[in-house]
Image: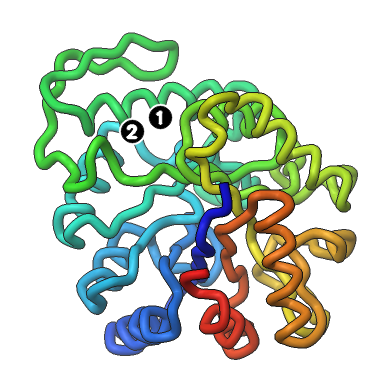
Amino acid sequence: MKRPFRFAAVIREADTAKSWADKARRLQDSGFDVLLVPDHLVGPRFAPLAAMTAAACATTRLKVGTLVFANDFRHPALLAKEAATIDVLSEGRLEVGLGTGWMAADYTSAGLTLDPPGVRIDRLAEAMTVLKGLWSDGPFRFEGEHYRITGLDQRPKPVQRPHPKLLLGGGGPRVLRLAAREADVINLTMRVRADGSGPDRADAGLDAFLKKIDIVRTAAAERYDAIELGTSVLQIGVRKTEAAWSAADSSRQDETPQVLLGSQDEIADKLRRWRDEHDLSYFVLHNESDLDAFTPIVENLAGQ
């Protein structure tokens, strides 16, 4: 099934409330669908909950979301209530991006324990069950290894039913299989190293990227047509040095949709091919500094 394109941009900070609102309105006016906020304790980034609320209040159509909430930073019962509140205040314009948490600097700087990937993935799976349960009607009970919910009936409930779209980002097989079973949107990334030091370069390149799509397709089975596949655009137009604050590594991704070099027409054609041949329709601009280069592509392809 050929989905219409959806476009998002990660916006990290602004100098004032007015500047933040202006950035949100620029995205809306340029045809972007979603403003996404990251979730890290280190680096030049706003905290996501307040930033999303302010962006939603400054716009009328633009959705707001995260790329992605680090599950280790919040109990899912707290996140469920905060997210439902934002969904109500935005009149149903929330998308909830969720991940395990992975960046070592976040953990070491705050004195948090970075558990092995398997533990974090198990905890993420339980958190997704808790979120969906607390967003449903009536009291919810859950007994897991990491979380216990004893008949909690939270209010408010989200405007979007049964719940806001859930986005999972990841590149490792276990996370992709979890996303295939539970997520509405999947942002395909390079696998990260177990120690949280950055992307695993052994997972780079076209073959690795296509394998991720195959993993999702197989694991999703009959759910596959209901899932939006996407990825983050790390380079556009001409290649630039990665920003100092960014953990991204695009050096071996030229054949993937994460690197879009060339003219506007060439880039638009590449995105159409990835949508038509490989089912990717949700593209996230990673660097706000690339907005001027990416906006004409969005204006060209929006709604197609």
The residue located at (19%, 44%) in the rendering is 158
Q: Position of residue 64 (x, y in %)?
A: 35, 63
Q: Nearer the viewer, mark 1 or mark 2?
A: 1
SS for callout 2: helix
State if disc 2 and disc 1 touch (CB < 8 Å): yes
196 relative to 12, above or below: above
- For this rendering, which residue is in front, 220 or 13? 220
Q: Give me the C-alpha separation between circle 1 and circle 2.
A: 8 Å
250 relative to 217, above or below: below
Whichever of labels 1 and 2 marks the residue nearer the N terminus, that label is 2
Residue corresponding to mark 1: 128
**Circle on res. 105:** none
SS for callout 1: helix
Color theme of the render: rainbow
Q: What is the crowding at mark 2: few (fewer than 14 residues within 10 Å), some, or many (at least 20)?
A: many
**Circle on res. 76:** 2
State whether residue 33 appears in this view: yes
Q: What is the crowding at mark 1: few (fewer than 14 residues within 10 Å), some, or many (at least 20)?
A: many
113 relative to 201, above or below: above
180 relative to 168, above or below: above
Q: Position of residue 72 (x, y in %)?
A: 47, 36
Determine whether, in the image, residue 19 is placed left or right of residue 181: left
State whether residue 195 appears in this view: no
